[in-house]
Structures are given as structure tokens and as C-alpha cells.
């Protein structure tokens, strides 16, 4: 037990020694790993941010059905019930003439003239139904229903479908898909590249120390004792790469937020991204380091398996 | 202690390095194996340390049947056998003390044990006071004695010395042989390969002659003539 513990400590120490000895090659390996992890983290955050933005805008989308003053309460309730029967309708909210006026006043609180003008007439605003769809891309059924002549008759104004918002959603959806796909390709490509580089780094390290490794084997060092330090070395790469990539992405958001003095960068809502980054910080730290370590350990595992021959030939 | 029963080793189909070699070595014996280069001496030793695997036949060392030995147990086997190589195989970037300590480190000895054990072994091989020297600063004979110290520091039951004097001048060669005799006296089985006639004749121990992969003679207190 004690021997195993001492052996473990020696393996770890040897791993760090290897790391220091092998630093020039190690820096290259780490750099590629940093790129991989940065792309990965950035894609994840961008993806989450876009999804959030879409949700937010989707939530704002509604269909405003303006009712004539002559529509009876009963007819109105029928209309609401009918609308609610539609699968794509999430909610129907009735806004009375009085509420509409209140909202109007609030929205124009700065414009005294307008407020004065409106207070001198009868309430000119129509009552309306705010219909929220589940999926803003499929509001045709609702539209069809609202355009039936007998329903159309009840409406005082043209129904508003928030068309401009839908366009924004389409744009962001496209960006999301693009980022997700480009991110995935980038992550896969760089993951393979970093694995190859680490693989070669370890191969070089094995080659440089082949005499020592041969002697170790002949003296009866266990497989794990010979192999362990190489794996520890790449685990150290992984930890460093994870930490560096997290700092890079964090700095990137902080700098862009302050440099542009804006809460968003194009379609990317920086303040949400920042928020996402800080609220999942420890999860991100854990995941980045875990992935870095996994990349490192896997490739050094394969490299040591290939280049440190443990089997005797028959 | 060591048992070989009709052991054959064939490299690449038609290159037979060992051909049905049978021999038996008792505990605490000192056995010299002689033969020309290419006769199969090194192959025999490599089979014992499991650097190579026999093509057929049975090998049992210290109660371990090599047919039943799993790859992952090879390190455990090698810890029970001390090996000295013709080319020393010392770590050039470590000093004498560290080279010997290395054999203990890799099997998990604590630092205290190492500090306690290594000087005593260096004393046995006559290298007291050379602890801090690097291998490059030593003569061939001294280097070989470092290698012997490393081989015996874990107190193996068997010591295999593969032409340990091959690269040494007669005086240094004899120093090395005397160390081996001393170790044998302490109770370690020693297997020595050499083609130094003078050493064989002076030692007057059991001599096994191998030629073309076969044991051609096996005599106690033997002399050796070409």
C-alpha cells in the first residue's frame, strides 16, 4: 500500500519533470489544444446565446386582432374560445379599450401634446386580442381563421402579425445553425489536429528517452510506472489548455463588451453571453479541463501503447 | 532454481538460436555459460529475463512457469532476477548513487530505505566514496560494478551476468568477477556468460558449453580449452 502510494507520487513527479523537460514541444501541443477548447467554448456560448435571443423574440411575437367597438362581449368570448382551439395558439389576452388607452399613455408619457389631445376626445383606441403563437413560423392557420369574412367583419383595423420580428428570428436561426455547424467542424478538426500533435510530442519524448525506458523495463518497472509519467504530462497540458481557453473566452467577452460599449455584437447578445459564462463558470471550468485532459490522456495512451512495447515476441 | 526442458527458440522460421536446450541450476550455484558469439548464450539469457519468449519447451525459474506467465506479471519476474549487461546500461545523466537507487525507486521503495540500502551495496562492490560520480567519470570496471550494485540492490535470488567482462581489460575484468563470487557467497545463484578462457579456468566452477544452439558439455569444476 505504502509502496503503491510512493510509486504514484513518483509517477506524478516524473510527469511534471517530463512536462518541464519537454516544454518546447509541449507548448505547441498546448496551443492547438487551446484553439480547440476555445472554439468549443465559444460555439457553446454563442449557441446558448442565440437560442436565448430567439426565445426572447419569439416570446414577444404576437398577433394583434383589433376589435370594433360594436362587437358584443358574447361575440368576443366566442372569438377567444375559437382562437384557443387552434393548436398553435399559446395564449389569448384581451386588452380592453381602457387598458389600451393606459398603455398608450404610458408609452407616450413624454409627449404632453399627444396626451392632452387624447384626453379631450373619446377613447379612440380599439379593444384588442393579443394572440401568442407557440411557433411563430406556422401562423398560417391562425391567419386563415382570422381572415374568414364573418371574423374579418369584427375587426376594426388590419391585423398585425409582427412580420419584421419574424425576419429577425430567421436571421438568428440561420446564424445559430451556422455557428453550430461551423463550431462542430472546427472542434472536430482541431481536436484531431491536437491529438496528432500530442501523439507526436509523446512519441518524440519516448524516442528521446528510449534508453532510460529500456533500462526501466529491464529492471522490472511496471507498465504504469513507465507509461504513467507520459500520461501525467499530457494531463498537465490539458489542464493548462483548459484554463487558458477559459481565460481567453472570458477576456474576449469582457473586452468586446467594454470596447463596443454595447450589450450586443451584431446578433450576439454579449450581456447574455457574459451572464451565461459567469453563471455556468464552474461547470465550464470543469468541462473545459475535462475535455482537455481527455484529449491529452487519450492520445498519450495510444502513443505509449504504440511506442512502448510491453509484449514479448514469440 | 532454474529449469529448462528442451527449450527451443527459432527466429524467423529457419534461424534456430536454441535447439532443445535442457539444464538445471540449483539454488546458490555459480554457473558459467560459454560459447562463441552467436552460439545462443544471449538468447538463453533473454529467455530467462523474458525479453524473448521460447518457441517451445518449458522454462521454470524460482517456481514460476513461464508458460503461465502473463505479460503484466513480467515486471514482477524481473524484480526477482538481477541482470548485468555487457554494455552496462547505466543512466548517463544520473550519478552512481542515483543509478543504483533507480532500481529501488521504480519498484516503490521509500527514500529512507533507499538512503539506507544503496551505500551498503556500493560498499559490497567496492565503490564507496564514488556515490556522486557520473558514469562518464568512471572506468569500465567501475561502471560494471555500478551495474552489479544496481542488479543486486533488491537482493534477487538469481543474478544473470551477460558477458560482464566483455568490454573490460583483464585487471578490471577480474575485479568484476570477484564481486560476482562475493555475491554468490552471500547466497545468490549466479549465471555468468563469458568467452574469457582465463576467467573460466581460474574460477573452476560448473561450465556449460553451448555451440550452435545446443548444450555440448556440462561439467562441474571444469576447465575450458578452445
Image (cartoon, coloured by chain):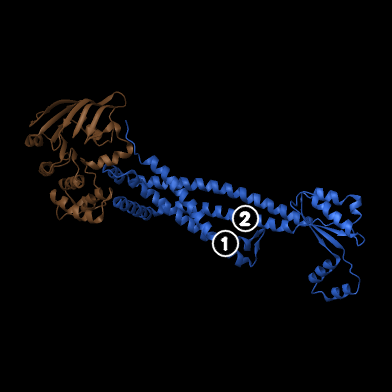
Chain colours: A blue, B brown
Q: Secondary structure at mark 2?
A: helix
- Give me the C-alpha separation between circle 2 and circle 1: 13 Å
Q: Chain of mark 1?
A: A
Q: Are marks 2 and 1 on the same chain?
A: yes
Residue A99's disc number: none
Q: Which residue is mark 1?
A: A279
Residue at image location 41% in from the left, 43% down from the top: A303
Q: Residue B54 location in percent, x, y? A: 27, 29
Q: Secondary structure at mark 1?
A: helix
Question: Which sits in the foreground, A85 or B194?
Answer: A85
Residue at image location 88% in from the left, 57% down from the top: A74
Horizontal side of A7 relative to A141 (left or right) equals left
Horizontal side of A43 relative to B173 (left or right) equals right
Q: Chain of mark 2?
A: A
* Viewer can see residue B195: no
Q: Residue A200 location in percent, x, y? A: 42, 45
Q: Quadrant of residue A118?
A: bottom right
Asked whether the residues under the numbered discs 2 and 1 touch, taking CB atoms below 8 Å apart as contact, a structural biologist would say no
Q: Residue B211 location in percent, x, y? A: 18, 26
User: In which quadrant of the rendered image does the N terminus of chain B lie?
Assistant: top left
User: In which quadrant of the rendered image does the C terminus of chain B lie?
Assistant: top left
Question: Which sits in the foreground, A142 or A301?
Answer: A142
Residue at image location 31% in from the left, 24% down from the top: B13
Q: Around disc 1, counting alpha carbons within 10 Å, would you say few (fewer than 14), some (14 to 19), or many (20 or more)?
A: few
Amino acid at each position: 500500500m505504502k509502496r503503491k502510494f510512493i510509486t504514484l507520487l513518483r509517477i506524478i513527479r516524473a510527469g511534471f519533470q517530463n512536462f518541464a523537460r519537454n516544454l518546447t514541444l509541449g507548448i505547441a501541443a498546448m496551443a492547438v489544444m487551446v484553439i480547440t477548447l476555445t472554439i468549443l467554448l465559444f460555439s457553446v456560448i454563442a449557441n446558448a446565446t442565440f437560442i436565448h435571443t430567439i426565445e426572447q423574440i419569439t416570446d414577444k411575437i404576437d398577433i394583434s386582432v383589433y376589435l370594433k367597438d360594436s362587437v358584443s362581449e358574447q361575440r368576443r368570448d366566442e372569438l377567444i374560445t375559437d382562437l384557443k382551439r387552434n393548436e398553435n395558439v399559446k395564449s389569448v389576452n384581451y386588452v380592453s379599450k381602457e387598458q389600451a388607452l393606459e398603455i398608450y399613455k404610458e408609452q407616450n408619457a413624454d409627449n404632453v401634446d399627444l396626451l392632452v389631445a387624447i384626453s379631450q376626445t373619446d377613447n379612440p383606441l380599439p379593444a384588442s386580442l393579443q394572440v401568442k403563437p407557440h411557433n411563430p413560423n406556422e401562423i398560417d392557420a391562425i391567419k386563415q381563421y382570422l381572415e374568414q369574412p364573418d371574423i374579418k367583419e369584427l375587426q376594426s383595423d388590419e391585423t398585425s402579425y409582427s412580420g419584421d420580428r419574424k425576419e429577425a428570428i430567421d436571421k438568428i436561426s440561420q446564424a445559430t445553425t451556422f455557428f453550430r455547424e461551423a463550431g462542430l467542424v472546427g472542434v472536430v478538426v482541431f481536436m484531431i489536429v491536437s491529438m496528432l500533435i500530442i501523439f507526436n510530442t509523446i512519441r518524440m519524448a519516448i524516442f528521446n528517452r528510449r534508453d532510460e525506458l529500456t533500462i526501466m523495463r529491464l529492471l522490472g518497472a511496471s507498465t504504469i510506472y513507465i507509461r504513467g509519467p507520459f500520461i501525467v504530462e499530457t494531463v498537465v497540458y490539458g489542464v493548462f489548455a483548459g484554463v487558458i481557453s477559459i481565460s481567453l473566452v472570458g477576456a474576449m467577452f469582457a473586452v468586446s463588451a467594454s470596447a463596443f460599449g454595447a450589450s450586443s455584437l451584431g446578433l450576439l447578445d454579449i450581456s447574455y453571453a457574459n451572464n451565461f459564462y459567469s453563471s455556468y463558470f464552474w461547470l465550464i471550468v470543469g468541462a473545459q479541463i475535462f475535455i482537455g485532459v481527455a484529449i491529452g490522456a487519450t492520445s498519450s495512451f495510444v502513443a505509449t501503447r504504440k511506442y512502448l512495447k510491453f509484449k514479448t515476441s514469440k | 532454481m532454474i529449469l529448462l526442458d528442451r527449450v527451443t527458440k527459432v527466429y524467423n522460421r529457419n534461424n534456430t538460436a536454441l535447439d532443445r536446450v535442457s539444464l538445471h541450476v540449483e539454488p546458490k550455484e555459480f554457473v558459467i555459460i560459454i560459447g562463441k558469439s552467436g552460439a545462443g548464450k544471449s538468447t538463453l539469457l533473454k529467455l530467462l529475463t523474458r525479453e524473448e519468449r521460447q518457441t517451445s519447451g518449458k522454462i521454470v525459474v524460482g517456481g514460476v512457469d513461464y508458460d503461465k506467465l502473463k505479460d503484466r506479471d513480467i515486471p514482477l519476474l524481473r524484480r526477482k532476477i538481477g541482470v548485468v549487461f555487457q554494455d552496462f546500461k547505466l543512466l548517463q545523466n544520473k550519478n552512481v548513487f542515483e543509478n543504483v537507487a533507480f532500481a529501488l525507486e521504480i519498484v516503490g521503495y521509500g527514500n529512507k530505505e533507499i538512503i539506507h540500502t544503496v551505500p551498503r551495496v556500493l560498499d559490497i562492490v567496492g565503490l564507496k566514496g564514488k556515490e556522486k560520480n557520473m558514469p562518464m567519470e568512471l572506468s569500465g570496471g567501475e561502471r560494471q560494478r555500478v551495474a552489479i550494485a544496481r542488479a543486486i540492490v533488491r537482493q534477487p535470488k538469481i543474478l544473470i551476468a551477460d558477458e560482464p567482462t566483455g568490454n573490460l581489460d583483464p585487471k578490471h575484468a577480474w575485479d568484476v568477477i570477484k564481486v560476482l563470487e562475493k555475491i554468490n557467497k552471500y547466497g545468490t545463484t549466479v549465471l555468468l556468460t563469458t568467452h574469457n578462457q582465463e576467467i573460466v579456468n581460474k574460477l573452476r566452477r560448473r561450465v556449460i558449453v553451448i555451440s550452435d544452439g545446443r548444450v555440448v558439455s556440462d561439467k562441474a569444476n571444469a576447465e575450458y580449452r578452445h
